[in-house]
Image (cartoon, rainbow, N blue to C red):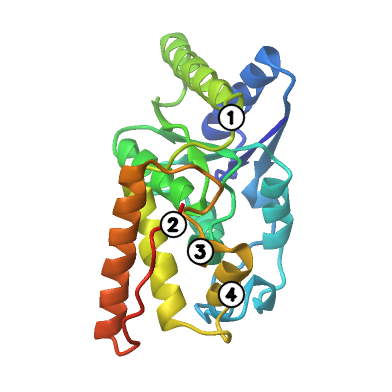
Amino acid sequence: MKVTAFVASARKRGTYQAACRLMDYLRVNGDIETEVVALSDYNLELCRGCKQCFDRGEEYCPLQDDRDVLVEKICESDGLVLATPNYSFHVAGRMKIFLDRLGYVFHRPQFFDKIFTNIVFQGIYGGRKINRYLDFVGNGLGFRVVRGICLTSVEPVTEKSQQRIDRSIRRLGNRFYSALNKKPYGSPSLFDLMKFRMSRTSIRLMLDESSRDYTHYRDQGWFDAGYFYPVRLSPTKRLVGWMFDRMASRSAGKNGTGDKTTQPSA
């Protein structure tokens, strides 16, 4: 297996060192290849908001930079860690630029067989909200999410602070390693099921062949699927999923696209 960490800080200190310690822990506890990637070493331009990736496909992005190199690193990995300092009570700028450039994946999630977590490093407070934000992002991209950690310390880091940091990293490493070794697919939560069924039904009814979202969902077989990936839904979730389809269908009808009924999916 391989785990890759993307680090948003340009300094090879607190945040970067925390990511390295997590990678060291994973290597010690299993046959895992690791890589720590400093986003500052790659060329990432600001998203222009042209929506070409949404409408036509990510390959039509006018920005010719290193986005696809980083996406390929994710595709080649079994697990991803996003590590960022707390800058102005949010992720560092390089991390936000990278996530903005992945906007099309929120429309067309793809990383279902991979594990995700995050590390936030801060000096004072506010990091827990960033953890929750990144957990939400990981879920939206399709990952199976292991709840991230917030590490607090001022410089220079004292021995006591470092011991506390190491304990938190070990606990995260245990949870992350356990998730890596579980079967790849689990039954979706009702919230995740709602997101999928309402999205796919809205896309089917409100878009057409000219939209990349529509052709992607069609080609993946998602218009007739119970969920993004093969999973046996309980009778209750099949019924609830059908209700979500109906809700999305009625909403599309109000927008002038007509009301096409859908049947419960397996």
Residue closest to the eye, 154 or 105: 105
Q: Are marks 1 and 3 in contact (CB under 8 Å)?
A: no
SS at mark 4 in the image: helix
Give the numbered dot on residue 265: 2
SS at mark 3 in the image: helix
Residue located 48% across and 46% down the image: 138
Amino acid tagged 3: Asp
Residue 21 in view of the camera: yes
Label 4 Cα neighbours within 10 Å, binned few <14 / some 14-19 / many ≥20: many
Amino acid tagged 2: Ser
Q: Are marks 2 and 4 in contact (CB under 8 Å)?
A: no
Residue located 34% across and 55% down the image: 241
Amino acid tagged 1: Lys
Indicate which disc, 2 or 1, sits on the residue closer to the N terminus.
1
Mark in the foreground, 4 or 1: 1
Q: Are marks 4 and 3 in contact (CB under 8 Å)?
A: no
Residue closest to the eye, 244 or 43: 244
Q: Which residue is mark 3?
A: 224
Residue 213 rendering spot, x and y as whole percentages: 54, 73
